[in-house]
Amino acid sequence: MSFPEGYSFLREWLDCKALVFFDFQEFDELNHSVLWLLYPKISNNEAYFSRMSRNEFIKYHHDERFDDIVNNRILPICDILANDKQNKRDYDEYIRRKRLSDVHRRMAINKPKRPKRF
């Protein structure tokens, strides 16, 4: 996985199984400060990020409700990502088996027939 110049340090966090938030001092379209959330590791070759309002992050911590955002927003997304990953693996396996069965079927159809003995 490659990263833009100056962001290669992200590679060090890819295997993390915890939530990681980054503050790159960026702003959204409405000029609100945003943080980037790195979701816990789901696969070996993919990383998932999403933006979160910095103010919302601070508010939830200040109100001692951060567990609410984790349980009601972040963990369900983690489950969806993990299920999508499993569904893709299942689909890839289905396609692989289908291709193999198609190859075997074609081999059986194209197999030369033996002459019958009398």
Image: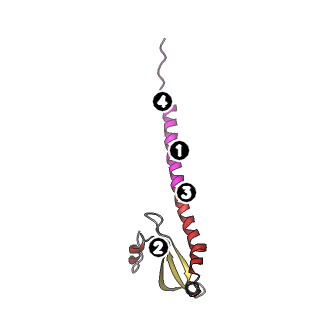
Q: Residues within 10 Å of mark 3 (few under 14, many from 20)?
A: few
Residue at 49%, 17% (x, y): give it: 116
67 relative to 85, above or below: below
Mark 4 highlights which residue?
Answer: 111
Q: CA distance from mark 4 to mark 2?
A: 56 Å
Q: Residues within 10 Å of mark 1 (few under 14, many from 20)?
A: few
Q: Nearer the viewer, mark 1 or mark 4?
A: 1
SS of the residue at dot 3?
helix
Q: Earlier in the sequence, mark 2 or mark 1?
A: 2
Identified by mark 4, the residue type is: Lys
Q: Is residue 105 magenta?
A: yes
Residue nearest the observer in this picture, 25 or 65: 65
Q: CA distance from mark 2 to mark 1?
A: 38 Å
Mark 2 highlights which residue?
Answer: 18
Q: Residue 45 bears which disc, if any? A: none
Residue nearest the observer in this picture, 106 or 82: 82
Q: Nearer the viewer, mark 4 or mark 3?
A: 3
Q: Earlier in the sequence, mark 4 or mark 2?
A: 2
Q: Residue 87 bears which disc, if any? A: 3
Give the overall secondary structure of the magenta segment.
helix
SS of the residue at dot 1?
helix
Residue 32 coordinates in the image, percent (x, y) = 58, 87
Q: CA distance from mark 1 to mark 3?
A: 16 Å
Mark 1 highlights which residue?
Answer: 98
Q: Is residue 69 left or right of residue 11?
A: right
